[in-house]
Amino acid sequence: DTGVSQNPRHKITKRGQNVTFRCDPISEHNRLYWYRQTLGQGPEFLTYFQNEAQLEKSRLLSDRFSAERPKGSFSTLEIQRTEQGDSAMYLCASSLFQDTDTQYFGPGTRLTVL
Amino acid sequence: GDSVTQMEGPVTLSEEAFLTINCTYTATGYPSLFWYVQYPGEGLQLLLKATKADDKGSNKGFEATYRKETTSFHLEKGSVQVSDSAVYFCALSPRGNYQLIWGAGTKLIIKP
């Protein structure tokens, strides 16, 4: 069990640029979640997948955000035309369908938009 | 809507002191309750959980009891160590839901 991995760990970009983050969940986990965490706050739910299907999106996820999970394995989160307010830690978690109470988190990708 | 409120930090204690971090929640129905810990430079880790009223979750010397009558899930440890220094998050998962709803976190600093 290698745990949930995320890449890159840090990303610095200029306002207006597009960025893409990757999450590799625990291999047998069929649910995958994205959260955003700003400094001094708890994570906020963004979206989740069951296998390859994106089943829910938070209203926090504006049209500039898109997430995919092709083939139900790894997932990508893309932010287009980044804004300074997008600066945050982006967290990925995974779980088994039978035990959604127990989510395993990756180390996160810290995004800084200049 | 559902929410979680934690005591503000930082909480600073001496080694071997008794720890309590308060957590109260608002939710309809019977949520599952969690404590997660985030050590410096690391990802969130599940510390303990409880899924029904009066359940006690425990791990690594930490305990928390699901109190429905007071809508609380306070985290306790009898004797803290320097290595317990971290940020602790209380969270809930509404019954039948996939989302975790989080408190703001409490930073714990243990001095030798």
Image (spheres, rainbow, N blue to C red):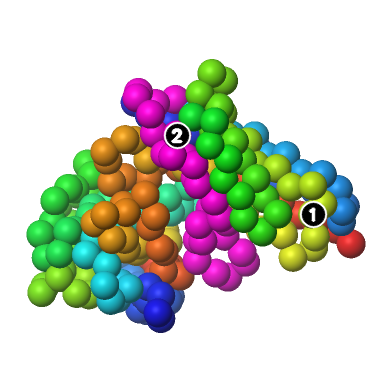
Give x and y (percent) for residue B34. 49, 45
Q: Residue at x 54, y 51 (%)?
A: B48
Side (left or right) of B66 relative to A22: right
For the residue carrying disc 1, how many other residues have a C-alpha within 10 Å: few (<14), some (14-19), or many (20+)?
many
Say whether residue A82 is magenta: no
Which quadrant would residue A22 be assigned to in this image? bottom left
- Counting every numbered tag in the picture gives 2
- What SS does tag 2 mark? loop
Give x and y (percent) for residue B80. 79, 54
State the extent of the magenta-drawn residues as a range: B26-52
Write down the chain letter for disc 1: B
Mark 1 lies on residue: B80
Q: Residue at x 57, y 60 (%)?
A: B38
**Which of the two discs, 1 and 2, labels the residue nearer the N terminus?**
2
Q: In the image, are marks 1 and 2 on the same chain?
A: yes
Give x and y (percent) for residue A106. 41, 69
Q: Amino acid at mark 1?
A: Val
